[in-house]
Amino acid sequence: MNTITKYILFLFFVSIVGISNAQLTKITGIVTDSISAKPLPFVNVQLVGTNIGASTGFDGKYIIETYAKSDSIKVSYIGYKTKKIRIKQGAYQKIDIKLTSSNIELAAVIIHPSENPAHILLRKVEAHKAKNSSYNLKAYQYEVYNKIQIDANNITKKFENRRSMRPFKFIFANVDTSTINGKSYLPLLISESISKINYRKKPEAKKEVIIASRASGIKNSSVSQFLGNMYQSINIYDNYMRIFNKNFVSPIAKSGLNFYRYYLTDSATIDGHWCYKIMFKPKRKQEATFTGVLWIADTSFAVKRVNMKIQKVNLNFVNAMSIRENYELVDNKYWMIQRQNFVVDFNLSEKSKKITGFYGHKTTLYRDIVINKVLPDSCYRTSVAVEVKKSAWNKGNTYWDTARFEKLNKEELGVYKMVDTVLNLPAFRNLYDMVAMFATGYYNSNYFDIGPYFTLYSFNGVEGHRFKIGGRTSNQWNDKYRFYGHLAYGTKDNKFKYGLGTILILKKNPRRAIDISYKKDMEQLGASVRALKQDNIVSSVFRRTPNSTLTMVEQYKSSFEYEYFNGFSNTLTFSRRKIFPLKDSKFEIFNNGKDKPSTLYNAIVTSEIELKMHFAYKEVFFVDKFNRKSLGTKYPTINIWYAYGFPKLLKSNFSYHKFQISIRQKFNIGTIGASKYILSWGKIWGNLPYPLLEVHPGNETYSYDDFAYNRMNYYEFISDEYLMANYSHNFQGLFFNHIPLIRKLKWREVIYGKVLLGKLSNKNWHYSKFPSNTSRLTKPYYEAGVAVENIFKILRIDASWRLSYLNKPNVRPFGIMISMHFDF
């Protein structure tokens, strides 16, 4: 059973456990005026007999979580009568409070307009950023402890009584309640990691080594990387904090006054430092901002504490998010983060209290901080984004009891045992098989996986009804090498198609792999690298025209991938391809020009060696057995590709050279959204028939393809030298967010443009007979479009225009396209 899939499925299925945490007192509520019912901000709520308390936010809400013993709270506010209310110890309770005016008439005070004192303080924070931010240190090292807990929330009696939950009835013995938004929850999973981090500014390098890691229900080194610190860091000193692929404006950003309202409300001594309390809230709705409290240290003007949360933001599947950070002074000079708590409430619905969702808690602690001590180069050198020591998963309870930075509570200790119990229940395993098939596309058995199910049936103009069965050996059978294959049959052409291959993983990270395969099956020449495969049922249904341009290809292929470090790799590939003509025609080759007798070929044969270089600085991968998913990088990704065709090798007909270089990048631009561009240039040397030239990617479906020209037909343009450019910008609701009724829909605006420049030499234009709709590019080809994303959170609708070559036959200058798109 795939451990990564099991981990994700466990969250999805909510087979959850809970151990009571009866000693913790949790109190939430809202304080309002007894007459007007308006929320009262800055109200003091304190546990009687302790120094523990809270003050209400702009919305009048307060939260107290404590192990301290007290039987009541005292609520006080200037101009209102102080109120004392009894509480229950060791329980969650929601106490809403109405305060009555004390009817005290205050003496008149004359207020002269002056600058907001909070603004003066924030300017000093900005002026001291360079000194207080860790980014400007020459070097630093520290140890990090990360604890991540996942809880299922919205646990109701109706949910507990479901038939599917009956085998797991024992896990609902104790349900707790969160102070974030008052939802009931049960702990699902817990993970811990301890790592060492070394940072050097010049030349910049950062290395994280995880020395210990464990997680309930899973044991995988790739997961360990994401349990560390590097992928989850949030820095208040950044002007924009990238969370869920969006730029959130920091409350101490240089442009913060454009996005926030600030109030200086209090001052106090914290850990021996005199600090000023600033409360802040967004100026406008649905912008990527926070509401919360800053504590700023006097004289150094560094952030001592921050407690902030989101309110109404154009963000999917996130109902609430809270960030708390504490900083400490190191060597009496440098302010470094000492603790961070990050909590997110995930749910498909924002309003429903009936749909089960998840809380994600992340607690990070830092210790043994060393400043400006530069270590030897070997301490910064690494070939992977995060190193995981081989012994990291082998640490026992004795080690963790002494090594973790703070003790686990009873609730957390119980999760490890209970999760393992649930994973081994037959009822969970049966449901796992069904959900895993839906998620991965394969039906999993002990030794063989059958699928993918979405290619079992499709249809097209060449094969008619196409039936296909495929499969692969499972991870359980062997996690070093895998066999895979398929068999298909078309009812119109009455032909079998098939394929077989094997992949050998020499090293998982950095990746070293060998892949050998054979196939004889249909291909769509001129489809983009991201297009839906022709045998995907979705591709069959959502087409503008019946697909009658499929080509039979017989291919032998072997490749060797060698990754030097994450983001930099070479792949060497040898392939022999035999391309058959469209339908029942033959390839017509004019060796001496179109006015001379031609030669007819039943197929075109090539023997080709190819070398590809991939470079993406700080690229992040999620690795599991045979599969590897790139999570991207904020830096440009460069791919360079060269191929040489051997003449007369294995009956090859042609000699040629091909070269292509491409660069792409996705990046956020402040608060106005995210841009993406793709640039590609290529050239082909040699006299070749059209299938071996650059068949520019068209799209004849109703689904938008980012890597294709969506108003172009297949085979419409072919070149031997070309330049392609694509630019798009997603405003992420920048305009819709300010339209009162529209902003509730959380739609997002997208614009894009594409251009293609190319040429085809006279030699190649006259060398072979082209498809009837093919033309040479004599001027640039243009496309442009607009789109609305996030319709019902999953749909995107595009309106695209073709701006050139409008007089060609079968051209559709304008079209509406619909596709599925998931994003936070």
Image (spheres, rainbow, N blue to C red):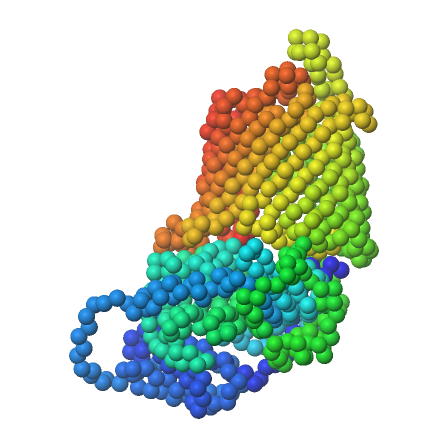
Q: Residue at x 54, y 58 (%)?
A: 201
Residue 505 appears in the figure:
yes
Residue 461 appears in the figure:
no
Q: Residue at x 70, y 32 (%)?
A: 643
Number of marks drawn: 0
Q: Residue at x 60, y 31 (%)?
A: 682
Query: On the picture, is 558 further left or further right than 401?
Result: right
Up-down relation of residue 523 to residue 795 (above or below): above
Q: Position of residue 762 (x, y in %)?
A: 60, 16
**Residue 769 or residue 185, whichever sits in front:** 769
Q: Position of residue 471 (x, y in %)?
A: 77, 47
Query: On the picture, is 794 further left or further right than 240?
Result: right
Q: Position of residue 142 (x, y in %)?
A: 59, 69
**Residue 567 or residue 801, whichever sits in front:** 567
Query: On the picture, is 527 further left or further right than 68?
Result: right
Up-down relation of residue 120 to residue 680 (above or below): below
Up-down relation of residue 633 to residue 199 (above or below): above
Q: Position of residue 460 (x, y in %)?
A: 67, 33
The quarter of the rendered structure image containing the N terminus is bottom right
Q: Residue at x 61, y 70 (%)?
A: 143
| Residue 560: quadrant of the picture | top right
Query: On the picture, is 738 further left or further right than 630?
Result: left
Up-down relation of residue 381 to residue 560 (above or below): below
